[in-house]
Amino acid sequence: MKAKFIVGIGIVITLFLAMNALAEEFDGVEFPAGDISFADVIVSYNPGSYATEPHLTPSAALGIPDHQGSGDDPETYVSLGNGGILILKFADNSLTTSGNSDLDLWIFEIGPAVEAMEVYISKDGIGWIFVGRVEGSTSGIDIDAYIGNGIISGERYAYVKLVDDEDDSSSHGDTAGADIDAVGAISSDVPVEPECSDSDGDGIPNPCDQCPDTQPGFSVHPNGCAAIKGDVDIKVGSENLRVKAVINTKEKGPVDAIFYNGGETFTDRGDRVIRGYFYADPSDVSWGNQGNPDLYVKIWFDVTGRMDVNFFHVSVPVIDVYSAYPHKESYDQHGMATMGDRYIRHEYQK
C-alpha cells in the first residue's frame, strides 16, 4: 500500500511539473498549457462594413497574441468590421469548464477604440451557446457562469464564434469593428472527438457531412449535400445565389441538370470558394451519372464583396448556364457553354 501511495504521489508531482514547464504568460495572462491553448483553425470569416485590406486576413487571429501594442501591424490581427463574424476552432486542444469562477476563455482584442462583441461557443460548430459579451481589449469569460444555460460541466468545446456588436461599433475606418489578435483557452483539455450524430437526418454523419443543414425530403450525395435538379440556391452572405444549368441533349432536348455541391474552403484572407459540378439526370439520358460531370462550377466570393460564378464546360452537348444574385424569380445572367467556348463567367459586385 505504501509503495502504491508513493507511486501515486510521484505521478501527481510529474504532471504538476510538466504543466508548469508548459505554462506561459501572454499579455499578463498565464496559460497553463502554453501556446497550445490558442485557436489554430479558421472556420469562417464574414467581415462587416467599413473594414478593408490589409486588415481582412483572418489567419492573423490564430496562434499566440503577437501584436506589440504600438503601431499598425496588420499581420498580427484581423478586423471584424461593423457586424462582422469570425469563427475559430481549437484543433489540438479544447475549451472546457474550470469548476470555479476563474476566467476560462480569453479574447485578445487590440486597438484604441473599445469595440464590443458577443461570444458563442460550440462543440460541433452547429449548435451555438451564448457565453457573454466582452467590451474589447484583453477580456476573459467564465463559461462556468453559463452552466444550466447551455453549458455542461466538464464538456469540451472546439469552436468559438465572435460577433461584432454593430450597434456599439462607432469606428468607420479601415479597421472598423473589433480587431482580434488571438483567442485562447485557459481551461484547456484534449481535442473534441468527432461525433457520429446526424443533425439534419440525411443519413450522413456530421463529421462527413459537408452540408449539415439539408432540408427534409431531399436525396443526398455521399458528401451529405442535396442532389438538386433545376434551380439551385446557395447561401452567400445574407443573400442567396441562384444558379442553373440546362443540358441540350439529342435524346430529350433541353433537360435540367443536377448540381453536386463539392463543398467549400476559405483562403487565408477569408475569400470563400464554393466548388461543384452539374451532371445529367440518369432518368433523362442513359449517359447521365454523378460520376460523369458535364459542367464544373467554381464560385468565388471575395472579402471585398465581389463574386465570380465560373462555369467550365467538360461535355459534348451545348449547356445553357444561368445565375442571379441576389436571388430573384428571373435570372440576371445567361451564357452558353459549348465545345468551342468552354468558359463562362458571371460577375457580381456587392
Image: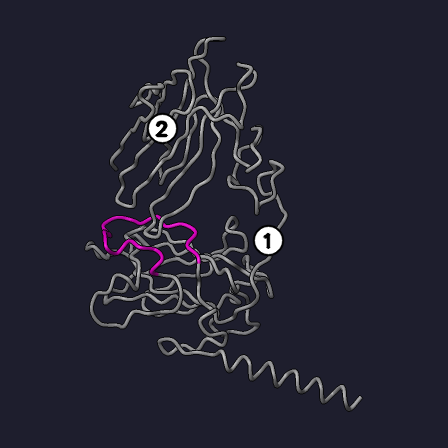
Q: Tag 1's secondary structure?
A: loop
Q: Residue at image x 38%, y 26%?
A: 243
| Residue 50 among magenta residues | yes
Residue 18 position, x and y percent, is 55, 81
Residue at mark 2: 311
Q: Quadrant of residue 39?
A: bottom left
Q: Residue at image x 42%, y 36%?
A: 275
For the N terminus, give its image quadrant.
bottom right
Is residue 226 rendered to the left or right of residue 313?
Answer: right
Tag 2: residue type? Phe
Q: CA distance from mark 1 to mark 2?
A: 35 Å
Residue 80 position, x and y percent, is 31, 54
Q: Is residue 90 above or below residue 2?
A: above
The residue sitting at the bottom extreme is 2
Q: Quadrant of residue 25?
A: bottom left
Q: Label 2: how many residues lie within 10 Å, few (<14), some (14-19) or many (20+)?
A: many
| Mark toward the viewer: 1 or 2 | 2
| Number of numbered discs visible in the structure rendering | 2
Q: Residue at image x 56%, y 67%?
A: 189
The boundaries of the magenta stretch are 41-60
Residue at mark 1: 194
Q: Tag 2's secondary structure?
A: strand
